[in-house]
Image (tube, rainbow, N blue to C red):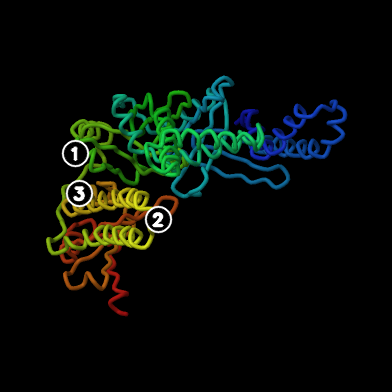
Amino acid sequence: MKKRRSHLINILENTSRFLILLLLPLIRALFATQVGFYEWLSGAWFDLLVLGVIIALGVYGWYSYTYFISKAGIHIQKGIFFRREWFLPFRNISVISVHAPWYYRPIKAVRVHADTDGGNPRESDFSITVNRELAAQLLEAAQRPLISQKSFRRTYIPRNLYITIFAVLTSNSLTGVLYLWATLSQAETVFGKSFRAELLDTFAELAEWQSFGLPPVFVILAYVVLGCWLVSFLKNMEAHLRFQTSRYGQTLDIRSGLFSIRHYAVTVRRINFLTLRQSLFTKLFGLTSVFIHCTGYGKKQEELSVLFPSGLNREIQTNLKLLLPEIPFAKRQIKPKLCNLSRFLIPPLSLCLVVLAVGLLALYFISGFDRPIIFLLIIAEIPCLWWLAVKLFAFFHTGIGVSDEVVTIYYTFLYQVITCSIPKHKITKIETQQTLFQLPTKCCDVWIHTWAEGTKRQKVLNLYLPEVLELLSSDEFFHTHVIQIEQEKKKKKR
């Protein structure tokens, strides 16, 4: 088989993180000074020498990484003086992703990543930048064993309204802050330190003009949070517009993106579990988002492992039966007891009272700042009260159900309402834990462990221990295979 190398743009990829540190200051110095080219060159020769070494290392990294595709999988070689070779069988690949950033589309280059369950959780098992035609050949070769002649394609395309709702719910200010800070840092490198100072002064003047009677610092904070959230929202919208999910044979074909195109080929049998996520708002309007956990999908920081961005509950259930019938949802068979309601409500109630007490103490001891303190107290109490509402709903939602194929768990995490269905053969361990305070009511927490590039575990709170043990021991799968049911009583022993 003919060995191939990555696209030539890979040389720039290998050096970009170091190249930017030298290239931009050199260019800025050239245009900012009045000296001639030869005078500039005599002062910058060492920087240019370092620049040449960085480019040479990039060329070496491009030349020393080769691969070829056989019927069985991907053969990879790396290095010249110290050569390393490895083989990635198609039968073990869980996800192949193809990403075409908007700035790569004119040169017809794409980034290809392939992952297996046994790889590094922080890096892809196979990662390369190639032409679109080579990426299409790789996808075809990997999917060929999973598609029979009787296979037919089933496709789900969500409405743009559902994608907008999904972008609103999944956007957060922290992502926007990181993206905006990186942009400003690069702008400061190009235009100088005065650029950021002038920008911040302009922003402060605008905040003071639009303060609405509040202290300018609060207005600045509100604008920063809103602006960063808007940046995150626009990034999510761009990433998920033109979203579609197709089932073809034993693969899920997921595509999305308006300017930067993303394409994922997911092997169905490698999916570890299926998750429905809701908030109280989406629960009220009957909307659900669906995610899958499969090694390699949603691995990058800017990616989400979404199967259906959002949709009405009835539509979601219908499309799940069409596209992923292998992972159904079992009805709850175990629910929390009424005597354990307090265990759901005490943590958020305690937090609400602590925040209120801190605010009242601040009002008592700090004079002259009543209005800002009250404003901060209200802002701090809102998420606490919302968490209290979520935990109250959690009492009626939490539980476990078991069917012939799956174990379905119902729980909440922070402000999310989660329903997760896990195929039985993907479960590596079930663990029950009891704290000292749970012993009198025979209450326990249940941990469900799965494994893929490391252990993943999910927790269901405050279930009745005898019912949990009875349900799992009565199920034939758990009774015969004895995955592992443990009861942790360390605190009781102490």
Q: Earlier in the sequence, mark 3 or mark 1?
A: 1
Mark 3 — residue?
404
* Amino acid type indicated by mark 2: Thr
* Amino acid type indicated by mark 3: Asp
Q: Earlier in the sequence, mark 3 or mark 2?
A: 3
* Amino acid type indicated by mark 1: Leu
Q: Give percent across and percent down for residue 115.
A: 47, 42
User: On the image, which quarter does residue 166 sit in?
Assistant: top left
Query: Can residue 315 be spotted in the picture?
Result: yes
10 Å crowding of disc 1: few (<14), some (14-19), many (20+): few
Query: Can residue 402 be spotted in the picture?
Result: no
Mark 1 — residue?
284
Dot in front, 3 or 1 = 1
Secondary structure state at the residue bearing disc 3: loop
Dot in front, 3 or 2 = 2
Q: Give percent across and percent down for residue 35.
A: 84, 28
Secondary structure state at the residue bearing disc 1: helix
Residue, far left:
338
Question: Cα distance, mark 3 to mark 1?
Answer: 31 Å
Quadrant position of the C terminus in the picture? bottom left
10 Å crowding of disc 3: few (<14), some (14-19), many (20+): few
Q: Give percent across and percent down for residue 406.
A: 24, 48
In the figure, is residue 288 to the left or right of 52?
A: left
Question: Cα distance, mark 3 to mark 2?
Answer: 24 Å
Question: Cα distance, mark 1 to mark 2?
Answer: 33 Å
Q: Earlier in the sequence, mark 1 or mark 2?
A: 1
**Numbered label attached to residue 24:** none
Secondary structure state at the residue bearing disc 2: strand
Mark 2 — residue?
455
Q: Nearer the viewer, residue 143 or 316?
A: 316
In the figure, is residue 402 to the left or right of 167?
A: left
